[in-house]
Amino acid sequence: MSEDVSRRSAMRLIAAAGTVGASLGAGGCAPTVPPPGAVPRRSASGAPGAPAAGSGTGTGTGTGGAARIDALLERLTLEEKTALLHGAVDPAPRGQAGYVPGVPRLGIPALRLADGPAGVRVDRPATALPAPVLLASAFDPALAREYGRVIGREGRALGQDVVLAPMVNLIRTPYAGRNFETLSEDPRLTADLVGELVRGIQDEGLIATVKHFALNNQEQGRDTVDVTVGEQTLRETELRGFEAAVAAGAGAVMGAYNKVNGVHACESRPLLDELLRGSWGFDGWVVSDWGAAHSTVAAIRAGLDMEMPGGTHFGEPLREAVRGGSVPEAAVDQAVHRILTTMDRFGLLAARQPARPPRDAAAGARVARKVATAGAVLLRNEHGTLPLTGAAARSIAVIGPTAQVPFTGGGGSSHVVPDGAAAPLTAIRRRAGNGGAVHHAVGEDLYGRPLPAKLLTPAADLEAREVGPGRVWTYEGEFRLAADDEWTLLVHYTGKRPGVRLDGEELFPVRQGMAEHYAGGLLGSAPDGMAVRRRTLALKAGTHRLAVTAAGGDRGQRLRLRHVTGAIRAADLAEAVRTAKAARSVVLFAYEDSTEGRDRTSLALPGGQERLIEAVAAANPRTTVVLNTSSATTMPWLSRTGAVLQMYYPGQEGAGATADVLFGDVDPGGRLTQTFPADERTTPVGSEPSRYPGVGGRQEYAEGVHVGHRWYDTKRQTPLFPFGHGLSYTTWQYEKLTVRPQRGGLRVEFTVRNTGRRKGTDVAQVYLGPSEELRLDQPVRALAGYRRITLAPGAAQRVTVDIDARTLSSWDPEKHAWVRGTGRREVFAGRSSRELPLRSKVVPASR
């Protein structure tokens, strides 16, 4: 049955929220003890709510600090109060995202806020961790906590107080540009992992900021799109991760850019006041995404506490609103109180603040390597292509530009400056040893070849130009093509972007908004660090006019103009084929460079990579394709390959981790946290523009509770690769399923046996069918639990997964509460959402 998404029902979405049963954590991961003064809240219906914020580690003074904070508030002037509610310019910037100056005369320190979903983003080196989607692929909440602790420790060591992480928005469409920064399409898995990420970050004394609240699941139109969503959909899908973050004690929540049911998220009372604080008991502060605040009165009344990055709405306009009576000063006091209370909880108001730890780069690198190997997903492996052993490991052709250029992460606010990163080619050569023959072919040129000086009239060397401070350098000339050709022109530069005009057209105009600021983690800069912009054009035979203008600015700059032609592409392809034919095995690195600020326009690999894979695999069927991509990818070339290894954006240790998996030093234990569609049309939002990207600025979450793999099951669509899929270097057998009722839910037990000859890792997954007696929309199968296990050859393990009352329940939009599904339920166990050899039916215990 479809849910009512009428405006009236949608605006009631938050009313009271009684929770059911156990917490969202998996595998018995319990929150730490809340600090003094943290007490469970109650919903408007009187039912116990989620645990109050504060269950993460903090060093504050609890109830004793409350009186001190009240005293501080009495001494603060209105101007000082509002200065704590918005960002400002840092007098000693460290490359972080935001800064709040504090009030030195009262001992209130400044706050520095850094980006950080995949490591701490400042102007100094930090551990570039694998993308969160690769972390999630390990299906390991304990590993998520380790990952969080690296961020927490390094954030403190690098002079930061708050990290803008984790990102918890669901992967709703494979086109979304930031899918690599988040975790999963599945609400349950997302909730389990985000809770441990928050705990890990805050274990180290750094304040975690869960984002983006809520429904910021695409980049296209993210500033303006109005998301229409029903109450049941919101509660059962997107909100589960945020609820888990609050239960874990997240100190801050970031409000999203978009509207939710007609109201900007940063001024939505139903979201911020009624749900986040009233229902879940959140007592940290809410900060806007950068530029996401749109009002003064409506925003602060709704529950927004801090505007970033400046004071457009919460600076002088807020002071005027207080003086004019449209905002009571008590509302300002409340926002300040939330910020100071959280700072106090983390010891930031203490006379002697917690000492900042030294940065441990080696420890960060170890965790980065561990995560990258644990999350590696082997999608395909025919005829024993992997692991590379024997002769196949001694004669290898390594192909692709990202084999020799380390590709650590995507573009945008999650991009981290690492201490260093090896190229995969280097790691493969090291692992193959002195007896191995490893040869490389670029296959596709990402950064261009120098323009021959004699091509231009007048002749000019545009490869290494330097423009001094205060100077302007110009060139005007022409070149002639004998035949039509496709050219890619690239400008590399170190200062203000040079102007490049071809036949009177500016090739690299400044783009609007984030699209200009974020150019990608791979394509936006050359290996030597110079910024890069590129443009591909179909050029006609004849003469073309070229003009270049570059300003040196205050510091001077370097620039170069490069190109790639059809002849260069053909030569690179031919070289790759020759190299593949001469080797026993091939490892081909394929890329897709995704970034904040824009969505993908296709699920296919960009450039000429599909043609490259087809040609190389035809030359050598023992071709392994390593995918460094952000999200799901279509693969028309799949059947021609020997193996496909999904490594996403693997961080600074990705080269070594990839070699570990290719050579079988570790078993590929990762599993997909998002469904890979068979084609671009067959996705939960692929054929309906009203679902994505929206029509007329309005978007409908009409798929309801059927997100991700649930949609494929409901529509009986066969994906390219299902949720939870991943191959192993050994073989597995599942047997002896028992399901029995227990207090509050079900206990599921089954045996997993390693039937192969190698030690291996598997992710045992349990899914739950719908309640036939519950008259609400329900998934055909919902992920109910999982266990990551590692077994020696021939070993077996009895796996236990408890299904809690929340998993057995659905959100009733009429009752505004969780209601338990009654009657017989079907339980499934296996290796993916589509490989479920064990099943049983049982009636859960009533309570």
Image (spheres, rainbow, N blue to C red):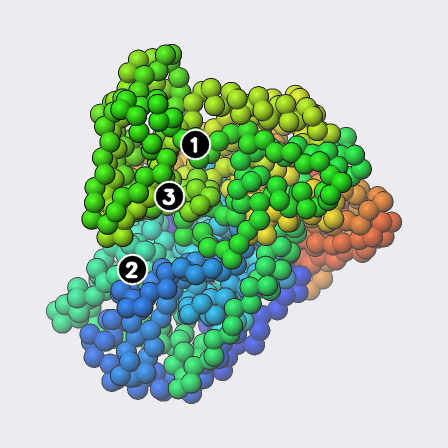
Q: Earlier in the sequence, mark 2 or mark 1?
A: 2
User: Which amino acid is tagged 2?
Assistant: Pro
Residue drawn at x 73%, y 29% is 584
The answer for how far apart the CA atoms under marks 1 and 3 are is 13 Å
785 sits left or right of 276 in the view: right
The residue that label 2 is drawn on is 309
User: Which amino acid is tagged 1?
Assistant: Gly
User: Which amino acid is tagged 3?
Assistant: Ala
Residue drawn at x 43%, y 42% is 526
CB-based contact (under 8 Å), mark 1 and mark 3: no
Judged from the image, the secondary structure of the residue bearing numbered disc 3 is strand
The answer for how far apart the CA atoms under marks 2 and 1 are is 37 Å
Visible residue check, residue 468: yes
Q: Earlier in the sequence, mark 3 or mark 2?
A: 2
Relative vertical location of residue 163 with respect to residue 753 in this rendering, above or below: below
The residue that label 1 is drawn on is 448
Residue 827 horizontal/vertical position (percent): 70, 48
Relative vertical location of residue 411 with respect to residue 563 in this rendering, above or below: below
Q: Quadrant of residue 491?
A: top left
Q: How many marks?
A: 3
As drawn, the label of residue 531 is: 3
Judged from the image, the secondary structure of the residue bearing numbered disc 2 is loop
* Residue that lies at the very extreme toward the right in this rendered image: 794
As drawn, the label of residue 747 is: none
- Name the foreground residue: 3 vs 30: 30
203 sits left or right of 448 in the view: right
- Name the foreground residue: 301 vs 202: 202
Judged from the image, the secondary structure of the residue bearing numbered disc 1 is loop
